Amino acid sequence: MPLDDLTRYPRPNVAVDLALMTVLPPFTGRGPEERLAVLVQHRYDDPTGLVLPGRFLRERQHLVEAVEDVVREKVKLDIPAAAPHFLKLFDDPDRDRRAWTISAAHVLALPYDALRNADGDLRPIGLDGRLVKGSLLFDHDAILRLAVEQMRERYERRPDPYGLLDGSFTLAELRDLHEAVLGERLRKDTFNRRMAEHLSDVTRHGQSLTRSGGGRPAKVYRKRRSQGHLSQSERRRLQLPRSAP
Amino acid sequence: MPLDDLTRYPRPNVAVDLALMTVLPPFTGRGPEERLAVLVQHRYDDPTGLVLPGRFLRERQHLVEAVEDVVREKVKLDIPAAAPHFLKLFDDPDRDRRAWTISAAHVLALPYDALRNADGDLRPIGLDGRLVKGSLLFDHDAILRLAVEQMRERYERRPDPYGLLDGSFTLAELRDLHEAVLGERLRKDTFNRRMAEHLSDVTRHGQSLTRSGGGRPAKVYRKRRSQGHLSQSERRRLQLPRSAP
DNA sequence: GAAATAGTGTCTATTAGACAATATCGT
DNA sequence: ACGATATTGTCTAATAGACACTATTTC
């Protein structure tokens, strides 16, 4: 904490930019590999083109609050419990040629239905983590790529870590979501077992929900308070903190 | 990228703080579980106490450059190839009660010898990731904890990811380093095999380096350009990108 | 050859993926 | 009973840890 003279140094503009992700319903436009989408907006000012929504940090504001402001004021949505994930601080002094601006990039995922009235367009994303069509201004393509990469990484092992399914769900619904995020088909049995330890069965009195179409009704699950799943070796290390040969 | 009026919003001070880590030689002070240490400095100004070194971001400066300035100007070291790792952006508006200051926390590790002439004290760190004795001002204890946590995480699987051994080394030297960082003993065979895939044998014509004391001389290794080690499933996924039942 | 340190063969428990059988519903 | 979907038993390959043996040096 350097504290020489607080007014001596010039200060950068500090912004937050948001990769607002969603999953498109099946059979929407492109193939099943392009169901992951991001909300982009058109800029009409000086540099014209597509951007991720963002804004400046207000006085004495937390980053998370600024992201919430973006969702409310720029995307025009009234979503209470947003849970943005910090991605990276983009600090290249030349990233915005108009002024020295650093940006804390975030990623947030919301259900498709919640984005119905959103201000902006939902653009599908390819397997390479870039827009299927077009590109973004500034370094926003890099932000998007990072967002997709991190999102996919987390959806590999955990059930819906970004909360796109907020209530309860069947394993089939969960798997469909994960397939859409990852852009690839997943094996049913492997997927079920991988997720099982992070889910709790929530079916009551044999009550179950299933889509019409027939077939055995699926159990309904809910995400469980994950205690940070431990591998064999990690478990051992906690039991025998430091024994050695 | 919001760009309404660049001068309309008040801007925070932007700082970088650095957890400068090292590993103390064996038999220095405390037990083998407290060989990991961090450089702290004493502040005499307004809030008096121990802090991690830090400074403000200069105009149009990269974060990494600011960290390099901290090493040069605050820690008074002339180390050319520093490779700091970003930890987190600390953004609590009240983290510094004097002024609105956000701080990009970084961690950097340097060999003990390089810190001989450093400005500041090397304080040992406990298994809990906190100073064995005392505490730091502001949120610097949290920065330190995060630095230790992330450092240990990386030293679990990769050989010296923070470059504390810069040239070549034996597996015994590498293991001693990892034991010091992790604060726990490691099995020789398991450790060797875990590291093997990330190392390349660099012994020439039977030339080898070993400390005196007898015993079979050890091979000398060097870190290899890691191609990001792939597990079984990851390998499969790259070969058959998206086949499914 | 004894002591000391280095490196490896191999056994075993755990895990992850794959196939296939069984279970439960609507009609 | 049949079609459809869900769930689970089980085989197998791969991995990680542990034990113990072999190897190479100095004295």
Image (tube, coloured by chain):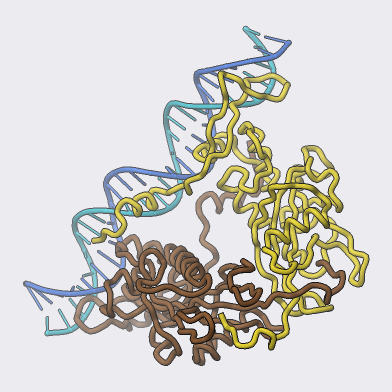
Chain colours: A yellow, B brown, C blue, D cyan
> Measured from the top left, where is residue B206 in percent x and y?
32, 81
The residue closer to the viewer here, A35 or B6, is B6
Q: Which quarter of the rendered picture does the C terminus of chain B lie within?
A: top right
Q: Where is residue D4 in the image (x, y as percent from the top left)?
A: 69, 22
Residue B135: percent from left, percent from top:
42, 73
- The percent position of residue A42, horizontal first and vertical second, equals 89, 60
Residue closest to the eye, A169 or B172: A169
For the residue pair A95 and A61, the one nearer the viewer reads as A61
Above or below B241: residue B198: below
Query: Can you see residue B240?
Result: yes
Q: State the count of labels.
A: 0
Horizontal side of A155 relative to A143 (left or right) equals: left
Residue at the spot 50% in from the left edge and 54% down from the top edge: B231
Q: Which residue is drawn at 75% across and 47% down?
A: A79
Residue A33 in sight from this viewpoint? no
Query: In the drawing, does residue B162 fall left or right of residue A76?
Result: left
Q: Quadrant of residue A192?
A: top right
Name the one closer to the observer, B148 or A197.
Answer: B148
Left or right: A12, with B234 as reference point: right
In the image, what residue occupies the spot 87% across and 69% down?
Answer: B4
Quadrant including the N terminus of chain B: bottom right
What residue is drawn where x is 28% and y is 80%?
A: B28
